Amino acid sequence: MALLEVSRLSKTYITGENAFGGGQRREIRAVDDVSFQIHQGETLGLVGESGSGKSTLGRLLLRLIEPTSGSVRFDQRDLTSLSTREMRRARRDMQIVFQDPFASLDPRMDIGQIVTEPLVIHERASRADRRRRAEELMRIVGLDASALARFPHEFSGGQRQRVGIARALALRPRFIVADEPVSALDVSVGARIVNLLRDLQREFSLTYLFISHSMPVVRYLSTRIAVMHRGRLVELGTTEQVTTAPRHDYTRTLLAATPELKAD
């Protein structure tokens, strides 16, 4: 059974109009009639060039932005019909790791505050319980507990992304949108983050939507691959099928433009 079901999801932006109603009105379909499913425990890799609508789609799944039309069902529950309060509760099971570890962490907060913020918002845990959970999360993502007293600017990009992953794990979610989590990192650091995400999936039975512009990274991590181009899904299949026998010209172009991925 699918954990997440997306049906005819679209997001249209209106541009060109000014405050007085003038200007040339133009519709931009960032996500255009997209449907797919993600099954419990799998990684669906979403790949496409910059501007193809991948990140918009990821945010639509969590209702961080509102769809123009279509539906998102999580664990058989229609998220698009939920009230703000109901959606807030649903987000305990659905979290996101953002692309830029330099922009996604509040520089005014120490790491302990950043990691435990979801617990403060969603749980009535004591300060001691939050501290214990934060220390556990540091261990899980490969950082020392002493990091909790430090601030984001004291860490490298890879370490900051580990903090972002720890924050996403704080509420023990079932589903994580990983929105290009290694694109701002150098190759070796990014590879370690990808391997961390893979290990965490095995340990905690996580389900991922892994968004990337890199076909080799998606191929390495994913159970199935969805290819997005100009707001539409143009191909969806198993990793082997998409990478060895692609059906769409755009998929073939992506494969031809990227080197072979070496698994460790």
Image (cartoon, helix red, strand yellow):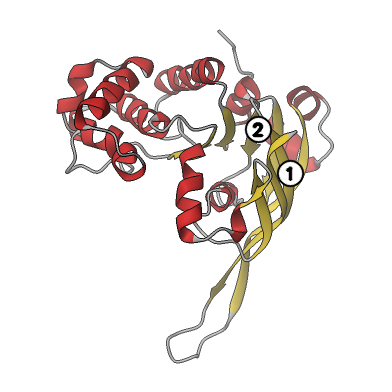
Residue at horizontal 42 percent and vertical 87 percent from the top: 19
Residue at horizontal 38 percent and vertical 31 percent from the top: 170
Report the side of 91 relative to 122 (left or right).
right
Residue 80: x and y in percent read: 61, 58
Q: Which residue is mark 1?
A: 36
Tell me where residue 225 sits by quadrant: top right
Report the side of 74 relative to 104 (left or right).
right
Residue 243: x and y in percent read: 75, 26
Q: Which residue is mark 2?
A: 44
Tell me where residue 256 sits by quadrant: top right
Q: In the rendered image, is residue 27 in sight?
A: yes
Q: Amino acid at mark 1?
A: Phe
Report the side of 233 relative to 45 (left or right).
right
For residue 14, above or below residue 134: below
CB under 8 Å between discs 1 and 2: yes
For residue 65, above or below residue 19: above
Label 1 and label 2: CA atoms lie apart by: 10 Å
Q: In the rendered image, is residue 64 in sight?
A: no
Could you tell me which secondary element the residue under label 1 belongs to? strand
For residue 74, above or below residue 198: below
Q: Amino acid at mark 2?
A: Leu
Along the line of sight, the residue nearer the viewer: 93 or 42: 93
Residue 146: x and y in percent read: 18, 18
Circle 2 residues within 10 Å: few <14, some 14–19, many ≥20:
many
